């Protein structure tokens, strides 16, 4: 049954969960509340073979609810999986990570390291490249974007390219573009993938009340738009119940500014 | 062999310009008492290799770091380390920014005596552009190119563990030993602080022996400092002191690191430091973070 009352965060969780549904037995790593809940929903419904960790050192046979848990809570450990062992998994390719980069460019390259044109003196220093170089060349990756705009979807290449994408200029010797495996992009206004011509970013669906025009205007580079773009599927009652179970402290309500509803006023009502 | 030393004696063995690896991960099980001891010393021009947290932030803020080898620096719940950020944005820091798995490979290469380990990690990214010294090589076995991740040889590794004996048998009984074994194996000398010093028969337990991740011959010196990882975590004894890290973060906006150091570190002993935060009993009350 499809729900009628749901938040935008919940819509994004369900849309993002699809990224993991056909992955089979891989480690799903969702960094941040919405990606983690997306993996938790998929593991509990369409892909029960999925693996997840406790964000520390164990693989779980059932996802943990996020945040403080009661003293009687028993974590469903099944395998020790310390950080050093994560790399053995990453480099084997049996993983799908979903992260929220600060910049994404037309090639699907992403940046979480630093902003500004001078690498030696960045305008804003962020995390560092972390595991993106290794993730991007080893296994499937999806992106989560809480605020779709041109500062995220940048017109030029990312200031610091942390992950390999579909850029022919940067293709390493002996590699094909198809060796890179970037899957879905779930933003607060739409779902996209990289299956346009020559791996161009392609619009898959728009969230309720969002126009195709809005997506084009808020993206800093050209995207592929086919005929008849569908609306992103609403969460089901089962999915909403699972989300509530895995997020008992309702942290999902704090992930998007003002926690907007899933169905927004039509674009013509809100155009400035 | 009795390897007991004081933290001051350990730091006195370090030299300007050394390459020093720091165990732990972000805000977890960092040898912070040794970091504070370095902050009180005259040491300078260090090359630091770390899965960085406040250890890196403090050393940067105090001007101890010439070069940083890193994949990230983060306090986790405060994603951006404020003093590392400041040092980078002022252009103060020479860096080698690599993938966190490349860092592991660099330590392994050093541990195994290899000049490099080939990896696909880094190809197609600015990690190669920003590190022109990183060589890309042809494979003798296939037609692909590979990044030759060089050995990250350390002059010293600094690591905090929960239990150790005076001979340098070290136990990490928390859920993850991170890359600490590789830091130790990559280093000429390893300086270990522990929350509890135990008799050697503590390790007669098979469970305890399985939580020892390197041979004692790799441990150069041991010092018991209960609470020595504060404000980072050391399970099973205490979690991350988020309250203290928030306070630390606030100094980046008001007062600067000098004011933080005046309040907690400079001209103070480790005992003074712990008294300021309520003593070891208060540290051991800090719950483990639930993710």
Image (cartoon, coloured by chain):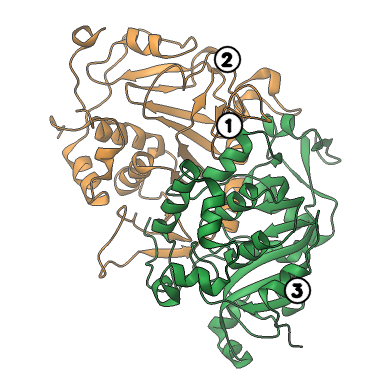
Q: Residue A159: x percent and y percent?
A: 60, 24
- Tag 2 secondary structure: loop
Q: Earlier in the sequence, mark 2 or mark 1?
A: 1
Q: Is residue A10 left or right of residue A133?
A: left
**Residue B133: which quarter of the image?**
top right
Q: Residue B276: x percent and y percent?
A: 45, 68
Whole-number angstrom distance, CA of label 2 to CA of label 1: 15 Å
Q: Is residue A261 left or right of residue A206?
A: left
Co-location on one chain, circles 3 and 2: no
**Residue A13: which quarter of the image?**
top left
Looking at the image, residue B36 lies above or below residue B46: below
The crowding category of the residue bearing disc 3, from other C-alpha atoms within 10 Å (few below 14, some 14 to 19, many at least 20), is some
| Label 3 chain ID | B
Which chain is drawn using orange?
Answer: A
Total labels: the figure holds 3
Residue picked out by circle 2: A156
Which numbered circle lies on residue A233?
none
Q: Nearer the viewer, residue A27 or A108?
A: A108
Q: Residue at x 59, y 78 (%)?
A: B210
Asked if marks 2 and 1 touch (Cβ < 8 Å), the reply is no
Looking at the image, residue B243 lies above or below residue A204: below
Which numbered circle lies on residue B218?
3
- Tag 1 secondary structure: strand
- Tag 3 secondary structure: helix
Question: Nearer the viewer's eye, disc 3 or disc 1?
Answer: 1
Q: Residue B106: x percent and y percent?
A: 74, 51
Q: Residue at x 61, y 51 (%)?
A: B56
The crowding category of the residue bearing disc 1, from other C-alpha atoms within 10 Å (few below 14, some 14 to 19, many at least 20), is many
Residue picked out by circle 1: A114
């Amino acid at each position: 049954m499809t729900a009628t009352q749901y938040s935008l965060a919940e819509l994004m969780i369900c849309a993002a969960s699809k990224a993991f549904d056909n992955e089979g037995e891989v480690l799903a790593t969702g960094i941040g509340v919405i990606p983690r809940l997306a993996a938790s929903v998929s593991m509990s419904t369409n892909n029960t073979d999925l693996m997840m960790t406790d964000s520390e050192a164990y693989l779980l046979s059932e996802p943990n609810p996020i945040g403080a848990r009661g003293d009687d809570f028993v974590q469903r450990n099944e395998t020790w999986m310390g950080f050093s062992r994560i790399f053995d998994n990453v480099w084997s390719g049996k993983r799908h990570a979903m992260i929220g980069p600060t910049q994404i460019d037309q090639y699907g390259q992403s940046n979480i390291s630093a902003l500004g044109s001078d690498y030696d003196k960045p305008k804003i220093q962020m995390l560092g490249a972390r595991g993106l170089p290794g993730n991007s060349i080893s296994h499937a990756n999806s992106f989560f974007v809480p605020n779709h705009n041109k500062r995220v979807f940048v017109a030029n290449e990312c200031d610091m390219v942390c992950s390999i994408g579909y850029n022919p200029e940067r293709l390493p010797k002996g590699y094909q573009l198809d060796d890179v495996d970037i899957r879905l992009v779930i933003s607060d206004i739409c779902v996209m993938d990289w299956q346009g011509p020559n791996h161009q970013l392609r619009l898959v669906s728009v969230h309720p009340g969002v126009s195709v025009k809005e997506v084009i205007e808020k993206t800093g580079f050209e995207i592929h738009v086919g005929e008849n773009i569908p609306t992103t599927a609403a969460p089901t009652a089962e999915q909403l119940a699972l989300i509530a179970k895995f997020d008992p402290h309702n942290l999902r309500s704090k992930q998007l500014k003002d926690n907007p509803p899933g169905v927004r006023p039509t674009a013509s009502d809100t155009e400035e | 062999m009795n390897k007991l030393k004081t933290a001051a004696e350990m730091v006195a063995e370090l030299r300007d310009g050394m390459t020093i690896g720091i165990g732990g991960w972000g805000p977890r099980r960092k040898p912070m008492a040794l970091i504070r001891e370095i902050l009180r010393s005259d040491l300078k021009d260090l090359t630091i290799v770390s899965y960085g947290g406040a250890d890196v932030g403090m050393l940067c803020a105090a001007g101890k770091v010439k070069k940083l080898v890193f994949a990230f620096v983060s306090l986790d719940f405060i994603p951006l380390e404020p003093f590392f950020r400041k040092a980078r944005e002022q252009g103060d820091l020479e860096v080698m920014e690599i993938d966190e798995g490349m860092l592991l490979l660099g330590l392994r290469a050093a541990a195994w005596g290899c000049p490099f380990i080939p990896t696909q990690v880094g190809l197609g990214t600015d990690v190669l552009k920003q590190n022109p010294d990183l060589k890309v090589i042809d494979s003798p076995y296939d037609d692909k190119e590979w990044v030759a991740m060089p050995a990250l040889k350390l002059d010293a590794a600094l690591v905090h563990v929960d239990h150790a004996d005076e001979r340098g048998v070290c136990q990490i009984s928390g859920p993850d030993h991170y890359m600490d074994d590789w830091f130790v194996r990559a280093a000429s000398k390893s300086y270990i602080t522990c929350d509890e010093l135990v008799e050697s028969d503590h390790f007669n337990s098979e469970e305890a022996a399985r939580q020892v991740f390197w041979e004692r011959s790799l441990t150069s010196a041991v010092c018991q400092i209960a609470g020595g990882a504060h404000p980072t975590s050391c399970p099973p004894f205490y979690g991350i002191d988020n309250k203290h890290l928030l306070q630390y973060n606030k100094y980046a906006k008001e007062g600067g690191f000098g004011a933080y150091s005046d309040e907690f570190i400079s001209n103070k002993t480790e005992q003074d430091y712990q008294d300021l935060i309520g003593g070891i009993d208060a540290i051991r009350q800090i719950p483990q973070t639930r993710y």
